[in-house]
Image (cartoon, rainbow, N blue to C red):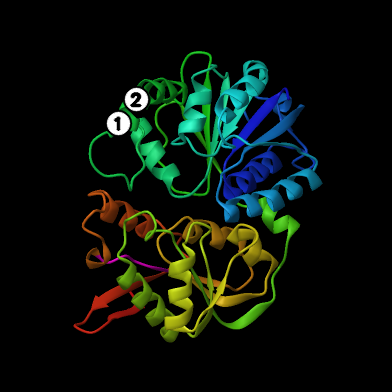
Amino acid sequence: MTGQLAFVESPVQLLNVLEWAHTRTPSGSPGTAAGGTPAPGTASDTTPAPLTVVVLSPTDPMSRGQLRRMAQLARDEGLTVHWQEARGGRGALVRTLRQLAGPLRSAERVIIGDPFSRYVQLLLTLFGPRHLTVVDDGTATMEFAAQLGRGERLVRWHRKGSLGPRELVLAPVTTLARRRLAPARGRTVEVFTSLPVEAPAGVEVTANAYAWTRARFGPPLLTGGADLVGTSLVETGVVDAGHYTRVVGELARTHGATRYFAHRRESAEKLHRIAVETGLQVVRPELPLELVARRGPVGRTIVSFPSTVVHTLPLALAGTGVKVAVCEVAPEWLRATASPRAQGFLSGVTGTAAHEVDRLTARRTPSVDRLGFG
């Protein structure tokens, strides 16, 4: 494992590594990506360099299943994929660090998908990469860029309160990792994203247009109705479960939806409640939604709560005639334990959605949340 290393922990991260590699190769095949030393766009930037993807495997079955299928797609595209059981019981951390230490030291460029990951932060403390690329793993990329620009410690937007015991122990690791994630003499930092981010000084932002996805799949067959996209806002403690289920049902009735594409972190209990109370067909996607939608069949309208897909789906489905709509999260849906930053962050995701995306506003009545186009 030499040349360039990518560390991924989710299916979307691996998808966006494929997209990044696609933009860096003259042939458009992700199998080799441009070397890290020259500035992007220069002639020498097209020199092929090997790219190895290291999957730091999560523990939940849905993520592991999607990652297995994404890993095979990456191999089909010519990438080398190394599956690392990074969380596989006692000794897994030490074993992983020992196996990756050499490749990390020799890698010219390192690509990561989650700068908030404690695992990735620990890896970053072991070496100082000359070139670092951060690819999207959700809307957290927006928060990462903002925190990096303000010089703040890296904290996920839905976390609340002061540092807990675990965070205090890991604080030195986080502090050093944050320095390694910032540009410095001898180190370049790139953010490869489909999201609207304000680049901190010295950080290069490269647009992800989902060119590989559009070239590889589709266009999809369109169905007559609508599809709903689920979210893990309940599981992360941000949104009240009762409000969420009622709004999902209202959205389904308003837009004639028949399918609910579940987020890979949604609980089985919540999904069962949604299926029973709304009559929606709950679908557990086998791949990231951008690929599922592009392959089809897919509804003519896709309705989502504030999430990355309100930015990515319009790109992946460009020219197909599919309409994407985002439903804002009303303040009364939030749990008392939600982070004080939650409402502002979610509103920012909705407000910065692509111009092609319709905004749905929630109008509160004594009996039910009504939703319509704003």
Between 341 and 353, the one nearer to me in the picture: 341
Picture residue at 74% right of the left edge, 45% below the top? 74
- The residue wearing badge 2 is 169
Q: Secondary structure at mark 2?
A: helix
Q: Is residue 286 on the magenta stretch?
A: no
Give the answer, above or below, for where 116 lies relative to 12. above
Report whether 348 appears left or right of 366: right
Image quarter hosting the N terminus: top right
Residue placed most toward the observer, 20 or 231: 231
Amino acid residing under circle 1: Pro
At label 2, which amino acid type do we have? Val
- Identify the residue position indicated by label 1 in the image: 165
Quadrant in which the C terminus appears = bottom left
Residue 328: in magenta span = yes
- State how far apart marks 1 and 2 are (Cα): 6 Å
| Mark 1 in CB contact with mark 2 (< 8 angstroms) | yes
Q: x%, y% of residue 124? A: 51, 23
Helix, strand or loop at mark 1: helix
In this view, the residue in front, 282 or 363, is: 282
Name, please, the residue furthest toward the front. 90
* Residue 4 image point, x, y percent: 68, 27
Residue 14, labelled with which disc?
A: none
Displayed quadrant of residue 43:
top right
Identity of the residue drawn at 75% across and 56% down: 216
Residue 277 sits in which quadrant?
bottom left
335, 374: nearer the viewer: 335
Residue 174 seen by the camera: yes
Q: Quadrant of residue 157?
A: top left
**Image position of 182 with respect to 272: above or below:** above
Over which residues does the magenta segment extend?
A: 326-330
Within 10 Å of the Cα at label 2, are there few (<14), some (14-19), or many (20+) other Cα atoms? few
**Residue at image location 49% in from the left, 19% down from the top:** 125
